[in-house]
Image: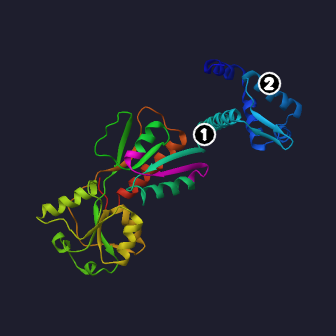
Amino acid sequence: MTPDSLERHFVSRLKIKHLRLLVTVGEQKNIFKAAQIMNMAQPAATKTIRNIETALDMSLFDRSSRGVSPTPYGEVIIKHAKLILSQIKHVSEELISIQDGISGKVSIGTLLAASPTLLPKSLATLKQERGNISVSVIEGTNDMLLPSLEMGDIDIVVGRLPEIQENESLKSEVLYYEPIAIVARKNHPLSKKDKLSLKDLVNEQWILPSEGTTLRREIDNAFHKEGLNVPQSCIECVSILTNRTLLLETDMVAAMPYQVIRSYEDMGLLTQLPIKIQAALGPVGYTVRANTELTPAANYFLSILKDTAKTLESDKNITH
């Protein structure tokens, strides 16, 4: 039998109930138990499987006194039958979501800028208002998340927008801009100063972002504009947890986007040093597919995201 003839047989002869039967027999390893679950008589289930095997000219199950087990052919069909049944389930969920707008699933990609405050606050509001909407969050970088967004595996990517939007199939919207904060542990000796300059900090031990990142370029430029060299005694790290621990346990200082350290500042763990640097990070926003309508669940989340961003924007440390 050729692939084309197999395909024609699947389309014309194989029904959804047949796929469910094959999957159930594969899971139960017993035709009698599978027939009970499917509310069928065992002879009818056995005959259905035999008919499928005869039509395909393939043995799908090995029979023994202890039950049945899928052959390699059976494993392939069962694997794909599960995928087909899963897609049917997803279609059903999406249709119900369209009907009432209070259920469904949203898959969100998040970048560092959104992870500490914007996204958690938005998700908390979403679950409070629409508890039936389930959420999947994938953390990563633009080069990982944007291809997944384009392929449809992710609905929305939230975080600092790329400097250049090269993909016409995607569209982005700015939510706000945020400044860079110079931070240290609470009660750090420098926090007692009324005012600081970069010259006062050039010999401190620093935690800096990796070279090549937008934040690092802005920090380097700020030092160069003051005629200063970038601090050499530094640790390059972008891990929030690692940097937090280093700051809490040492007298190191770090430059971070304000929203990254805001929650730690609220908890009294970290503090902003009395210095403002002239540096502008790229905007924080979201990216979606350009020519695809979002599901009702994703649209509802997006409306909450925008409202949360407006609240953060009203903070005196956030600019637009």
Q: Amino acid at mark 1?
A: Ser
Which is nearer the eye, 212 or 100?
Answer: 212
Is residue 231 covered in magenta? Answer: no
| Range covered by the magenta-colored residues | 129-144
When asked about the image quadrant of residue 165, the answer is top left
Q: Earlier in the sequence, mark 1 or mark 2?
A: 2
Can you tell which of label 1 and label 2 is closer to the viewer? Answer: 2
Q: Classify 10 Å Cα crowding around label 2: few (below 14), some (14-19), many (20 and above).
A: few
Residue, disc 2:
51
Residue 13: image location, x then y, percent: 72, 21
Nearer to the camera, 230 or 52: 52
Residue shown at 28%/46% (left/top)? 163
Q: Which residue is mark 1?
A: 97
Q: Quadrant of residue 87?
A: top right
Question: Which numbered circle lies on residue 144?
Answer: none
Q: Tell me: 300 left or right of 147.
A: right
Tell me the residue at 53%/45% (across/down): 106
Q: Is residue 41 visible?
A: no
User: Is 311 positioned to the left or the right of 280 in the image?
Assistant: right
| Quadrant of residue 263 within the rendered picture | bottom left
Q: Residue at x 14, y 61 (%)?
A: 224
Q: In terms of secondary structure, where does tag 2 sit?
A: helix
Indicate the secondary structure of the residue bearing disc 1: helix
The quadrant the N terminus occupies is: top right
Name above or below for residue 282 compared with residue 273: above
